[in-house]
Image: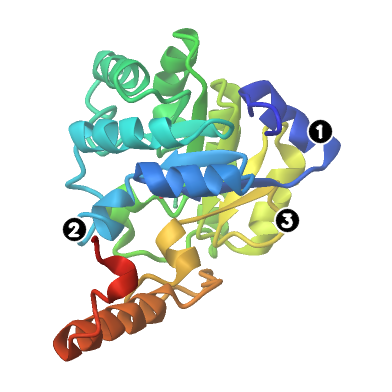
Amino acid sequence: MKEKVTVPQILLMKQKGEKIVMLTAYDWITARIIDESGIEIILVGDSLGTVIAGYETTLPVTLEEVIYHTRAVSRGRKRALLVADMPFLSYQSSIRDAKISVGRLIKEGGAEAVKLEGGKNMADTIKAIVDMDIPVMGHVGLTPQSIHRMGGYRVQGREERQRERIIEDAFAVEEAGAFSIVLEGIPYDLAATITKDLKIPTIGIGAGVHCDGQVLVIQDLLGITFPPRPKFVKAYVNGGEIIRKAVREFIDDVKAGRFPDEEHSYH
Ligand code: KIV
């Protein structure tokens, strides 16, 4: 096994021009497989609300749910840096609430860092968490917890005013002490500008190739999703079809009395 990935190593990767790869995971077995495949960061995203729980948005996700999934992932991962997402209302209400939520994600979940959405408006919160010696990953651009303000999952930063705001937000996150930042759903040239100007690594999702790293939701990468599929998603395998085919074969085998056969029976 290559050596354990740490926050200082992630910062060093930007300085060396090495791309950072992050994937989400929500359970032990997936975490173990992607960890053994050599991923640098595993994110227990609040996307678990949409891809695991079947909610329409990430807003209903609770801190308890993120802690439960983070604990499972932490048992499967040995090398990757483990980042837990802070769900809606676990940090917006007050800095004290944010600190308690972070403490629980670290103590009970086994996370090594946390991620939260927001820019200038969250700078004091990020600083307070960093002052607890807990590394923070920022998240600006299309922030899914702001779906109602944005009016849907829309690309952000196409207009000049929005573009400036996203740049200001990214700088505020860096200044507050975050060790990295997710850039989601913004034009690739805006992501390139931010990546060039920030000292901390940018990790893109729907933000083009110029980011310092990339993240995908594991179900998207595996093709275990239902349409519509966002433009930025690349499914590396049609997992949905593979599962359907295997289940159909199992049904046929059982109905025809072909399963269990000799090989799969005890004597
Ligand atoms: O919740 C999540 O999975 C995320 C990533 C898509 C960055 O925030």
Q: Earlier in the sequence, mark 2 or mark 3?
A: 2
Identify the residue at image location x=22%, y=26%.
93
Q: Nearer the viewer, mark 2 or mark 3?
A: 2
**209 versus 99 height, above or below:** below
Q: Position of residue 173 (x, y in %)?
A: 54, 30
Q: Secondary structure at mark 3?
A: loop
Residue 182 visible, this angle: no
Given the image, on which type of amino acid does mark 1 rest? Gln
Q: Secondary structure at mark 2?
A: loop
Q: Quadrant of residue 210?
A: bottom right
Q: Position of residue 163 (x, y in %)?
A: 57, 54
**How many angstroms separate mark 3 from mark 1 (CA)?**
14 Å
Query: Residue at (34%, 34%) from the top-left corner?
Result: 70
Determine if residue 59 is in view: yes
- Left of 263 or right of it: where is 88? left
Residue at point 30% right, 48% down?
145
Q: Is residue 207 above or below residue 178?
A: below
Closer to the camera in the image, 140 or 133: 133
Q: Which residue is mark 3?
A: 210
Q: Secondary structure at mark 1?
A: helix
The amino acid marked with disc number 2 is Tyr
Q: Nearer the viewer, residue 98 or 157?
A: 98
Amino acid, disc 3: His
Label 1 belongs to which residue? 15
Give me the disc on residue 55.
Answer: 2
Label 1 crowd (10 A; few <14 / some 14-19 / many >=20): few
Residue 94 picture location, percent across and down: 25, 20
Determine the CA span between mark 1 and mark 2: 39 Å
Among the two numbered marks 3 and 1 on one chain, the one whose residue lies closer to the N terminus: 1
